[in-house]
Every structure is written in structure tokens, then in C-alpha cells.
Image (cartoon, grey):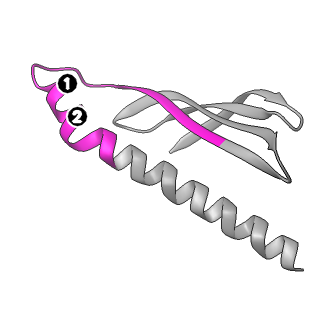
Amino acid sequence: VEERSIAYEARRGQESAVEDPEIRGIQRIGFAPKGEGVLVTLELEYEIRTRGVFTGLVDVLFVRGAQTASLRRTLDRLGHEVTSAAAG
């Protein structure tokens, strides 16, 4: 996966252009105060590079689930890094 930062705002978030052989899109991560902590949002807007008759069906049945799992793993790793850093 190739990622290129296209927008950044300190303490608010970042946008990156992402590409791989199957998709291209924009990934956003945002940070906002929430009580004593921080609310983290992560989203990916993407399009499938190779379009065909079954692209929509393939997207719903296979691609979205894989992308959701990938974003979840990214947030899990971020949470682990933050927790480890806070623990010293």
C-alpha cells in the first residue's frame, strides 16, 4: 500500500491518499476531546480500480469487510501504542 499525506492539522487529524493494486482512496484520522480522553475516528473512502459487472457485489461481499477489519486492526494497534506509551 502506498500512502501520501495530503492534509494535516495539529491535534485534529490527517488525510492521506492511499493506493494499492485494487483500490485508491482517501484515509482520514481525526482526534477530538471526549471527557478525560480523546475520541479517535478513522475512515476510508475508496473506489475499486477495476470496474466490471459484478464490482458492486464484490465490494459488498468481500472488499468492505476486509477494509473494515483492516481499519479495526489499525485502531487496535494505535490503542496498544498509546497504552504502552502512557504506562512508561
Residue 54 image position (x, y, % from top left): 11, 25
Q: Quadrant of residue 16?
A: top right
Residue 38 image position (x, y, % from top left): 79, 48
Residue at disc 2, secondary structure:
helix
Could you tell whether 3 is left or right of 87 in the image? left
Q: What amino acid is labelled 2 in the image?
A: Val
Q: What amino acid is labelled 1 in the image?
A: Gly
For residue 56, the mark is: 1
Q: Are marks 1 and 2 in contact (CB under 8 Å)?
A: yes
Q: Report the number of numbered marks.
A: 2
Residue 21 image position (x, y, % from top left): 37, 37
Residue 17 image position (x, y, % from top left): 59, 29
Give the spatial CA distance, label 1 vs label 2. 6 Å
Could you tell whether 53 is left or right of 34 in the image? left
Q: Residues within 10 Å of mark 1 (few under 14, many from 20)?
A: few
Q: Which residue matches tag 2? A: 60
Residue at disc 1, secondary structure:
helix
Specify the farthest residue to the front. Answer: 35
User: What residue range appears in magenta?
Assistant: 41-65
